[in-house]
């Protein structure tokens, strides 16, 4: 028997609203100044720079400790493999963080997940820098990585909030550049710091300070961009002005169900990986690309320290070749933007996901060539160090031209399930990438540089058909997808 509902104090139940939809606030159809699409260009630019700089800090922090691993391991009296866990567990934190930051950003908005993840991540990085034993170091690095995942998870959502289909690809391209330039600029920075009088602990103090600066600026100046939360604020303002407490936003009627959150951000992503060939194969390709980034954190120091006998700081400078390749990759992708925008306009602003894969058709072969080139020019000091360094340009170009279009393809192809798709992708690629630092140096030492790169190059070659296949058969597979029906 249901319990009788009472207003209390003998008050009768008031009549229902005539039509709740008439009391729901929305944005005006065109040029509503409150909608992020219509913000001033300066506001969009400031927001983009702030959040992308946060992404750079997080990715930079993930790799800056790698050159300091030997010094820290020696101080704590442990092997290099144990010290490497400080990098591995940070990246593994990327895989678990989306379970916290993704649902929070869709319930409470973007600002506070971004701000708090930076500030709390900075605290854990300070804790890592002051660690008295290796256990504290690696555990705090894991939680710092978990906080860092807030940037990787939420920033694409912010860019989608403030840019429409025409310019979103450009914004995501620049975001992707920060994701990869960070790990490749960290080795020579960390190498010079660790080999100086500052010591290895300052490879953690400095990124912690950068996190605090970014988090502090976000706390005071970052505006909320999530449309449902902006409508909640609009409804609250109208209620105060009119005293009509029936006015509301749809987001206010949302009831949080923990079961639904677990399904959306954990169960469903795993199910999509197992049942959707597009998500599985594209995510595997992206995981290999992302893993190779952290593989090179071990391979480059081995090549340029052990074979070419550079010192700790100088041995990281060849990473500049990879950064240059990434800049060229982004430039190539942006050069295709005009063509994409034209096709989008001709198709009545309805995107076709397979259009996103065009840069990958060039990037995949160039990436594979770069790996073979590096391996067969870096195995002996008799070959000048410039040749393997130049090979990094091809690798960096391929990394961007494969990873970024594939990411955009997954989002466009599974737009109704974008949150679950991105969560599945981040969990898989971060889990795979976390393992690479643990075996990369041993692989290059025991197999030899040329044969280790031959193995990696063959894996890259096997994956070249993936974007070609989905460019042709992607529409058919999407029509057959049960998840999209």
Image (spheres, helix red, strand yellow):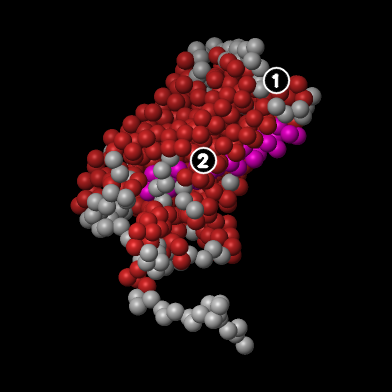
Residue 368 in percent (x, y) is at 46, 34
The residues tagged by marks 1 and 2 sit, at their Cα atoms, a distance apart of 32 Å
Residue 108 in picture, x, y percent from top left: 49, 53
Q: Earlier in the sequence, mark 1 or mark 2?
A: 1
Question: Would residue 351 be found to the left or right of residue 118 on screen?
Answer: left
Image quarter of residue 445: top right
The secondary structure making up most of the magenta span is helix
The magenta stretch spans residue 184: no
Range of residues picked out in magenta: 135-161
Extreme residue toward the right, this view:
77
Task: Quickly name the residue at label 2.
Answer: 115
Front one among 475 and 38: 38
Please name the residue that numbered disc 1 is placed on: 71
Q: Residue at x 63, y 21 (%)?
A: 202
**Above-or-below relation of 2 to 51:** below
Point out the image quarter for the N terminus: bottom right
Q: Residue at x 35, y 76 (%)?
A: 19
Rendered location of residue 342, percent (x, y): 21, 46
């Amino acid at each position: 028997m249901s319990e009788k509902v009472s207003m209390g104090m003998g008050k009768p139940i008031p009549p229902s609203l005539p039509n709740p939809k008439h009391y729901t606030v929305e944005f005006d159809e065109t040029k509503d100044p409150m909608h992020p699409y219509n913000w001033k260009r300066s506001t969009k630019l400031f927001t983009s720079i702030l959040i992308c700089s946060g992404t750079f800090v997080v990715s930079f922090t993930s790799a800056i400790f790698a050159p300091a691993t030997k010094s820290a391991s020696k101080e704590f009296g442990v092997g290099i493999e144990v010290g490497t866990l400080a990098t591995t567990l940070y990246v593994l934190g990327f895989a678990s963080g989306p379970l916290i930051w993704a649902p929070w950003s869709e319930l409470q908005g973007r600002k506070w997940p971004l701000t708090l993840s930076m500030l709390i991540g900075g605290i854990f990085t300070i804790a890592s820098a002051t660690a008295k034993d290796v256990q504290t170091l690696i555990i705090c690095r894991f939680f710092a990585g978990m906080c860092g995942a807030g940037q990787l998870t939420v920033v694409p959502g912010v860019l989608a909030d403030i840019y429409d289909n025409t310019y979103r690809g450009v914004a995501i391209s620049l975001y992707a550049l920060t994701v990869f330039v960070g790990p490749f600029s960290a080795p020579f920075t960390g190498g010079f710091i660790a080999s100086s009088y500052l010591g290895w602990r300052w490879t953690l103090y400095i990124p912690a300070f950068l996190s605090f600066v970014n988090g502090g600026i976000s706390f005071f100046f970052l505006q909320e961009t999530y449309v449902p939360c902006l409508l909640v604020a609009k409804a609250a303002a109208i209620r105060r002005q009119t005293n009509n407490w029936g006015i509301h936003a749809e987001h206010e009627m949302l009831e949080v169900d923990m079961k639904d959150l677990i399904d959306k951000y954990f169960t469903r992503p795993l199910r999509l990986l197992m049942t959707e060939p597009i998500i599985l194969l594209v995510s595997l390709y992206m995981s290999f690309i992302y893993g190779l980034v952290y593989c090179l954190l071990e391979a480059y120091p081995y090549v340029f320290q052990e074979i070419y006998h550079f010192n700790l700081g100088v041995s990281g400078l060849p990473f500049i070749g990879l950064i240059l390749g990434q800049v060229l990759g982004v430039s190539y992708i942006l050069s295709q933007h005009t063509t994409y925008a034209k096709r989008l306009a001709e198709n009545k602003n309805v995107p076709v996901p397979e259009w996103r894969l065009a840069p990958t058709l060039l990037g995949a072969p160039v990436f594979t060539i770069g790996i073979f080139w590096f391996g067969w020019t870096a195995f002996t000091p008799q070959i000048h160090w410039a040749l393997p360094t130049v090979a990094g340009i091809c690798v960096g170009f391929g990394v961007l031209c494969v990873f970024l279009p594939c990411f955009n393809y997954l989002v466009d192809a599974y737009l109704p399930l974008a949150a679950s798709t991105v969560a599945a992708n981040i969990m898989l690629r971060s889990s795979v990438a976390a393992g690479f630092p643990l075996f990369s140096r041993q692989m290059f030492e025991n197999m030899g540089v040329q044969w280790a790169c031959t193995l990696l190059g063959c894996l890259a070659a096997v994956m070249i058909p993936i974007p070609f296949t989905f460019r042709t058969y992607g529409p058919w597979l999407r029509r057959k997808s049960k998840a999209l029906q």
